[in-house]
Amino acid sequence: MESAHSIRFLYRHFLSGITEKSLNAFYYACSYAKVDYSGFMNITASMALNLIPESLRSQPVFLCIDDTMAAKFGKKFDNVSKLFDHAAHNGSNYLNGHCFVRLMLCVPVWRKHRIVYIAVPLGYRMWNKELSKLGLAASMIRQVMPVFLSQKNVIVLCDSWYAKKDLVCVVNEYANLDIICNARYDSVIYDLAPQPAGKKGRPAKHGKRLSPDNDFTLSDEKVGEYYIGARRVLTNLFGQREVLAYVTASEKTQGTRRLFFSTIFPHQLQIFCAWQEKAPLNQTGSSRMEFIPMLCYCFRWNIMPISALLALCRHFFNTDMFIKAELLLIFL
């Protein structure tokens, strides 16, 4: 999807093959058509949920949030600005262009007797500085959540930039919505509140402050590529809600450590680990059950090429529905 960088590009490589309309017709439609494009996200989400086989209906689905940048050479485009890009390869960490917040849905399907999560892009929203990227992401989740009311577990996956109160507050609005996120390593975390001691005064709201370096016991062996430590904590990010904190390290005694939070606990997840195609989730035994939410974070990188996704649509849908699916994915 990121390679489809303009309407002209889409017209040359796809639209001109399925319609006799001119390129100007699409320019005009995008500029003047009074269409509520937000509804397309719900339609796409519904179609993606229909891909889930009946035997996998109880499995969790994942909403992945990230942003992407589109470089522009001109400076007279609407909402174009100077953006920081840590992955830029132009000799500078800044580029001139647009920033888009994107929402992606990961759903489980069977492939060669294994469970595979495929990624379906639901929508993109251009950041125009009127609303923060956190606000855009939160509004997109609220837009599509009515489609997922029948799902047992819907889990938001995001990196540390989006782990802020403006976004995580959405989790409290839906009973079946949780979040697993990377967090700033210097995030304030506390031990659970001690039991009342029967003394006068207000009971403690939380225990002592914890350090990711000293207060987490890492696993004896690597789980996938990392040693992992886990414990229940309280943090300012989630208020008085008890969450799971994970610390990962590539080396047990040294190396960089990363901090993650999960609002969902292993006993709340119904996930068929043994049937998963992706390791180390398919190697999870009873000794690793507490790490399952952390291992689910890997689905954030499970991006399937559009060509493979459309091939899957051909398999499940008839021709008319397939063409509609193509158009929806293209215009999102």
Image (cartoon, grey):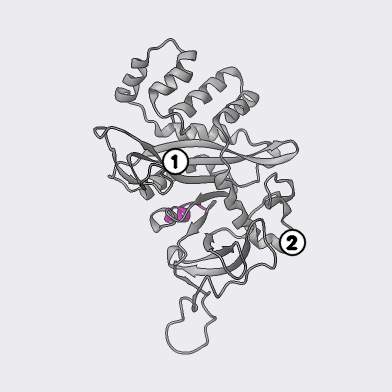
Residue 193 pos. (x, y %): 51, 77
Q: Residue at the location (69% across, 60% down)?
A: 289
Q: Residue furthest left?
A: 76
Q: Secondary structure at mark 2?
A: helix
Q: Residue at x 53, y 42 (%)?
A: 148
Q: Quick check: 128 left or right of 319?
A: left
| Nearest the eye: 238 or 115 | 115
- The amino acid on which the numbered mark 2 sits, given as a three-letter code, is Ser
Specify the segment rendered in magenta.
169-175
The stretch drawn in magenta includes residue 229: no
Observer-nearest residue: 38 or 80?
Answer: 80
Which label is found at residue 286?
Answer: 2
- Report whether 8 appears left or right of 212: left
Q: In the rendered image of this protein, does residue 220 appear above or below residue 23? A: below
Residue 86: image x %, image y %? Answer: 41, 49
Q: Which residue is mark 1?
A: 102
Three-letter amino acid code of the residue under disc 1: Arg
Mark 1 surroundings within 10 Å by alpha-carbon count, few (fewer than 14), some (14 through 19), many (20 or more) = many
The residue under the point 45% across, 45% down is 66
- Do the residues bearing badges 1 and 2 touch, measured as CB atoms within 8 Å? no
Is 110 in front, or is 169? 110
| Mark 1 and mark 2: Cα distance apart in space | 36 Å
Q: Residues within 10 Å of mark 2 (few under 14, many from 20)?
A: few
| Left or right: 102 as drawn, with respect to 248 | left
Magenta segment, principal secondary structure?
A: helix
